[in-house]
Protein backbone atom coordinates (compact mmCIF):
# COMPACT_ATOMS: atom_id res chain seq x y z
CA UNK A 1 0.00 0.00 0.00
CA UNK A 2 1.25 3.52 -0.80
CA UNK A 3 1.48 6.10 1.99
CA UNK A 4 -1.67 7.79 0.70
CA UNK A 5 -3.53 4.46 0.70
CA UNK A 6 -2.44 3.95 4.32
CA UNK A 7 -3.72 7.45 5.16
CA UNK A 8 -7.04 6.53 3.54
CA UNK A 9 -7.27 3.27 5.55
CA UNK A 10 -6.72 5.15 8.82
CA UNK A 11 -9.13 7.94 7.86
CA UNK A 12 -11.94 5.57 6.81
CA UNK A 13 -11.51 3.59 10.05
CA UNK A 14 -11.99 6.82 12.03
CA UNK A 15 -15.21 7.63 10.15
CA UNK A 16 -16.69 4.42 11.63
CA UNK A 17 -16.93 6.44 14.89
CA UNK A 18 -19.18 9.02 13.22
CA UNK A 19 -22.90 8.67 14.06
CA UNK A 20 -25.89 10.59 12.64
CA UNK A 21 -26.64 13.76 14.56
CA UNK A 22 -23.03 14.38 15.60
CA UNK A 23 -21.24 17.74 15.65
CA UNK A 24 -17.84 16.97 14.08
CA UNK A 25 -14.46 18.70 14.07
CA UNK A 26 -13.17 18.34 10.49
CA UNK A 27 -9.36 18.11 10.40
CA UNK A 28 -6.82 19.53 7.96
CA UNK A 29 -4.14 17.84 5.90
CA UNK A 30 -3.75 14.97 3.46
CA UNK A 31 -4.98 12.30 5.91
CA UNK A 32 -7.96 14.18 7.35
CA UNK A 33 -8.96 15.04 3.78
CA UNK A 34 -9.88 11.39 3.21
CA UNK A 35 -12.08 11.37 6.33
CA UNK A 36 -13.92 14.51 5.18
CA UNK A 37 -14.40 12.99 1.73
CA UNK A 38 -15.84 9.81 3.29
CA UNK A 39 -18.23 11.77 5.53
CA UNK A 40 -19.47 13.68 2.47
CA UNK A 41 -20.00 10.41 0.61
CA UNK A 42 -21.96 8.82 3.51
CA UNK A 43 -24.15 11.93 3.76
CA UNK A 44 -24.82 11.82 0.02
CA UNK A 45 -25.70 8.11 0.21
CA UNK A 46 -28.05 8.77 3.16
CA UNK A 47 -26.01 6.50 5.48
CA UNK A 48 -25.32 9.53 7.70
CA UNK A 49 -27.84 12.26 8.61
CA UNK A 50 -27.97 15.52 10.57
CA UNK A 51 -24.20 16.05 10.69
CA UNK A 52 -22.76 19.48 11.52
CA UNK A 53 -19.10 20.04 10.56
CA UNK A 54 -16.75 22.52 12.25
CA UNK A 55 -13.78 22.99 9.87
CA UNK A 56 -10.26 23.47 11.28
CA UNK A 57 -9.05 25.56 8.32
CA UNK A 58 -10.25 27.60 5.36
CA UNK A 59 -9.03 24.75 3.17
CA UNK A 60 -11.20 22.19 4.97
CA UNK A 61 -14.09 24.67 4.96
CA UNK A 62 -13.87 24.78 1.14
CA UNK A 63 -13.59 20.99 0.86
CA UNK A 64 -16.60 20.44 3.15
CA UNK A 65 -18.65 23.06 1.29
CA UNK A 66 -17.95 21.31 -2.02
CA UNK A 67 -19.14 18.02 -0.46
CA UNK A 68 -22.37 19.58 0.85
CA UNK A 69 -21.48 18.96 4.51
CA UNK A 70 -23.51 21.40 6.65
CA UNK A 71 -21.04 23.72 8.43
CA UNK A 72 -21.03 25.76 11.61
CA UNK A 73 -18.50 27.13 14.10
CA UNK A 74 -17.47 27.08 17.77
CA UNK A 75 -19.62 30.13 18.57
CA UNK A 76 -22.71 28.03 17.76
CA UNK A 77 -21.29 24.68 18.94
CA UNK A 78 -18.81 25.15 21.82
CA UNK A 79 -18.85 21.38 22.51
CA UNK A 80 -18.28 18.82 19.77
CA UNK A 81 -18.93 15.08 19.77
CA UNK A 82 -15.91 14.01 17.75
CA UNK A 83 -12.98 15.40 15.80
CA UNK A 84 -10.92 13.51 13.24
CA UNK A 85 -7.51 14.93 12.29
CA UNK A 86 -4.03 13.96 11.23
CA UNK A 87 -0.74 14.59 12.99
CA UNK A 88 2.89 15.12 12.07
CA UNK A 89 4.25 13.12 15.01
CA UNK A 90 2.68 10.80 17.64
CA UNK A 91 4.66 9.72 20.72
CA UNK A 92 3.95 6.57 22.81
CA UNK A 93 1.74 8.63 25.18
CA UNK A 94 -0.42 9.89 22.28
CA UNK A 95 1.06 13.38 22.50
CA UNK A 96 1.18 15.00 19.07
CA UNK A 97 3.04 17.47 16.94
CA UNK A 98 0.66 19.18 14.53
CA UNK A 99 0.77 22.28 12.40
CA UNK A 100 3.15 21.49 9.59
CA UNK A 101 0.17 22.32 7.40
CA UNK A 102 -0.16 25.64 9.21
CA UNK A 103 -3.60 25.08 10.81
CA UNK A 104 -2.56 24.40 14.38
CA UNK A 105 -4.46 27.27 16.07
CA UNK A 106 -7.93 26.46 14.78
CA UNK A 107 -7.20 22.72 15.13
CA UNK A 108 -6.20 23.12 18.78
CA UNK A 109 -9.21 25.37 19.54
CA UNK A 110 -11.65 22.91 17.96
CA UNK A 111 -9.99 19.66 19.06
CA UNK A 112 -9.84 21.00 22.60
CA UNK A 113 -13.66 21.11 22.70
CA UNK A 114 -14.35 17.53 21.61
CA UNK A 115 -15.60 14.60 23.66
CA UNK A 116 -13.48 12.35 21.43
CA UNK A 117 -10.44 13.40 19.38
CA UNK A 118 -9.46 10.66 16.93
CA UNK A 119 -6.03 11.06 15.32
CA UNK A 120 -5.41 9.33 12.01
CA UNK A 121 -1.86 8.59 10.87
CA UNK A 122 0.21 6.28 8.75
CA UNK A 123 2.94 4.50 10.73
CA UNK A 124 5.65 6.94 9.51
CA UNK A 125 4.33 9.49 12.04
CA UNK A 126 5.19 7.38 15.12
CA UNK A 127 8.14 8.77 17.12
CA UNK A 128 9.79 8.03 20.47
CA UNK A 129 10.01 11.70 21.45
CA UNK A 130 8.21 14.76 20.04
CA UNK A 131 10.49 17.13 18.16
CA UNK A 132 13.21 14.47 18.04
CA UNK A 133 12.89 13.64 14.37
CA UNK A 134 14.60 16.89 13.36
CA UNK A 135 11.38 18.04 11.74
CA UNK A 136 9.65 21.33 12.49
CA UNK A 137 7.87 22.14 15.74
CA UNK A 138 5.51 24.91 14.58
CA UNK A 139 4.74 27.97 16.72
CA UNK A 140 2.13 30.50 15.58
CA UNK A 141 3.20 34.07 16.44
CA UNK A 142 1.98 37.60 15.75
CA UNK A 143 3.77 39.26 12.81
CA UNK A 144 4.69 42.28 14.96
CA UNK A 145 8.47 42.12 15.65
CA UNK A 146 8.59 38.46 14.61
CA UNK A 147 12.42 38.48 14.66
CA UNK A 148 12.31 39.39 18.36
CA UNK A 149 9.93 36.53 19.14
CA UNK A 150 11.89 34.06 17.01
CA UNK A 151 15.09 35.00 18.86
CA UNK A 152 13.38 34.58 22.23
CA UNK A 153 12.13 31.12 21.25
CA UNK A 154 15.55 30.07 19.98
CA UNK A 155 17.23 31.19 23.22
CA UNK A 156 14.58 29.44 25.29
CA UNK A 157 15.73 26.05 23.99
CA UNK A 158 19.43 26.84 23.81
CA UNK A 159 20.47 23.84 25.87
CA UNK A 160 18.74 21.36 23.56
CA UNK A 161 20.19 23.06 20.48
CA UNK A 162 17.38 25.00 18.82
CA UNK A 163 17.16 26.81 15.49
CA UNK A 164 14.12 29.02 14.88
CA UNK A 165 13.11 29.67 11.27
CA UNK A 166 10.32 31.87 9.90
CA UNK A 167 8.11 29.76 7.65
CA UNK A 168 8.02 31.21 4.13
CA UNK A 169 5.95 30.37 1.06
CA UNK A 170 8.02 28.23 -1.32
CA UNK A 171 6.86 30.08 -4.46
CA UNK A 172 7.69 33.68 -3.50
CA UNK A 173 9.79 33.51 -0.32
CA UNK A 174 7.26 35.72 1.49
CA UNK A 175 6.32 34.86 5.08
CA UNK A 176 3.64 32.17 5.27
CA UNK A 177 0.45 33.76 6.69
CA UNK A 178 -1.98 31.54 8.61
CA UNK A 179 -5.80 31.60 8.30
CA UNK A 180 -5.67 33.93 11.30
CA UNK A 181 -3.24 36.44 9.73
CA UNK A 182 -0.28 35.29 11.83
CA UNK A 183 3.22 33.98 11.06
CA UNK A 184 4.72 30.59 11.91
CA UNK A 185 8.15 30.03 13.44
CA UNK A 186 9.38 26.48 12.94
CA UNK A 187 11.63 25.26 15.74
CA UNK A 188 14.23 22.56 15.04
CA UNK A 189 15.75 20.74 18.03
CA UNK A 190 19.01 18.82 18.15
CA UNK A 191 18.23 16.96 21.39
CA UNK A 192 15.17 15.54 23.14
CA UNK A 193 12.89 18.21 24.62
CA UNK A 194 12.41 16.34 27.91
CA UNK A 195 9.48 17.74 29.93
CA UNK A 196 6.92 18.62 27.24
CA UNK A 197 4.57 20.47 29.60
CA UNK A 198 7.41 22.67 30.81
CA UNK A 199 8.39 23.34 27.18
CA UNK A 200 4.77 24.19 26.35
CA UNK A 201 4.47 26.63 29.26
CA UNK A 202 7.80 28.27 28.40
CA UNK A 203 6.73 28.84 24.79
CA UNK A 204 3.33 30.25 25.73
CA UNK A 205 4.83 32.68 28.28
CA UNK A 206 6.12 34.80 25.38
CA UNK A 207 3.52 37.56 24.67
CA UNK A 208 4.19 37.40 20.90
CA UNK A 209 3.31 33.70 20.80
CA UNK A 210 -0.27 32.75 19.90
CA UNK A 211 -0.06 28.92 20.09
CA UNK A 212 2.30 25.99 19.42
CA UNK A 213 2.01 22.62 17.68
CA UNK A 214 2.38 20.31 20.68
CA UNK A 215 -1.03 18.74 21.40
CA UNK A 216 -0.40 17.21 24.83
CA UNK A 217 -2.91 14.81 26.36
CA UNK A 218 -5.61 15.82 23.85
CA UNK A 219 -6.01 12.74 21.64
CA UNK A 220 -8.44 10.09 22.95
CA UNK A 221 -7.79 7.60 20.12
CA UNK A 222 -4.98 7.14 17.60
CA UNK A 223 -5.58 5.07 14.47
CA UNK A 224 -2.36 3.87 12.85
CA UNK A 225 -2.28 2.33 9.36
CA UNK A 226 0.84 0.33 8.55
CA UNK A 227 2.18 -2.55 6.52
CA UNK A 228 0.64 -5.04 8.98
CA UNK A 229 -2.84 -3.44 8.91
CA UNK A 230 -4.62 -0.84 11.00
CA UNK A 231 -4.32 -0.44 14.79
CA UNK A 232 -6.72 1.48 17.03
CA UNK A 233 -5.05 2.76 20.20
CA UNK A 234 -7.24 4.24 22.96
CA UNK A 235 -6.13 6.42 25.85
O1 LIG B 1 -0.92 20.63 9.87
C1 LIG B 1 -1.58 19.81 10.51
O2 LIG B 1 -1.85 19.94 11.71
C2 LIG B 1 -1.97 18.53 9.82
O3 LIG B 1 -3.08 17.93 10.46
C3 LIG B 1 -0.78 17.61 9.93
O4 LIG B 1 -0.50 17.50 11.28
C4 LIG B 1 -1.01 16.25 9.33
O5 LIG B 1 -1.02 16.41 7.96
P1 LIG B 1 -0.90 15.15 6.98
O6 LIG B 1 -2.06 14.25 7.33
O7 LIG B 1 -1.02 15.77 5.62
O8 LIG B 1 0.43 14.50 7.23
Image: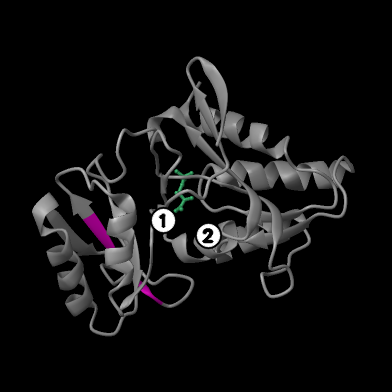
Q: How many marks?
A: 2
x 46%, y 45%: residue: 87
Of the pair 116 and 74, the residue shown nearer to us: 116
Colour basis: one colour
Q: Which residue is mark 2?
A: 107
| Position in image of residue 20 (x %, y %) | 85, 47
| Position in image of residue 64 (x %, y %) | 69, 57
Main secondary structure type of the part rendered in magenta = strand
The residue carrying mark 2 has its beta carbon less than 8 Å from ligand 1 = yes
Q: Is residue 126 above or below residue 150?
A: above
Dot label at residue 118 = none
Crowd tier of the residue under label 1, counting other residues whose Cα lies within 10 Å: few below 14, some 14–19, many 20 or above: many
Q: Is residue 68 above or below residue 229?
A: below
Of the pair 174 and 32, the residue shown nearer to us: 32
| Position in image of residue 187 (x %, y %) | 23, 57
Crowd tier of the residue under label 2, counting other residues whose Cα lies within 10 Å: few below 14, some 14–19, many 20 or above: many
| Position in image of residue 139 (x %, y %) | 33, 64
x 42%, y 55%: residue: 101
Quadrant including the C terminus: top right
Q: Which residue is mark 1?
A: 99
Magenta stretch bounds: 182-187
On screen, residue 125 versus residue 58, left or right, reads left
Q: Tag 1, which secondary structure?
A: loop
Does residue 30 appear anywhere in the picture?
Answer: yes
Q: Quadrant of residue 120?
A: top right
The residue carrying mark 1 has its beta carbon less than 8 Å from ligand 1 = yes
Does residue 184 appear anywhere in the picture?
Answer: no
Of the pair 95 and 62, the residue shown nearer to us: 95
Q: Is residue 136 above or below residue 221?
A: below
Amino acid sequence: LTQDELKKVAAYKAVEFVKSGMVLGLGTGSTAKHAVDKIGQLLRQGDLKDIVGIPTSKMTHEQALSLGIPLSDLDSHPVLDLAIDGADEVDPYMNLVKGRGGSLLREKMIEGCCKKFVVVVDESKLVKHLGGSGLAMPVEIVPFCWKFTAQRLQLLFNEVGCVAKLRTCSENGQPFVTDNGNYIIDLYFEKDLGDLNAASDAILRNPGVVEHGMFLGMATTVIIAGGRGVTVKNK
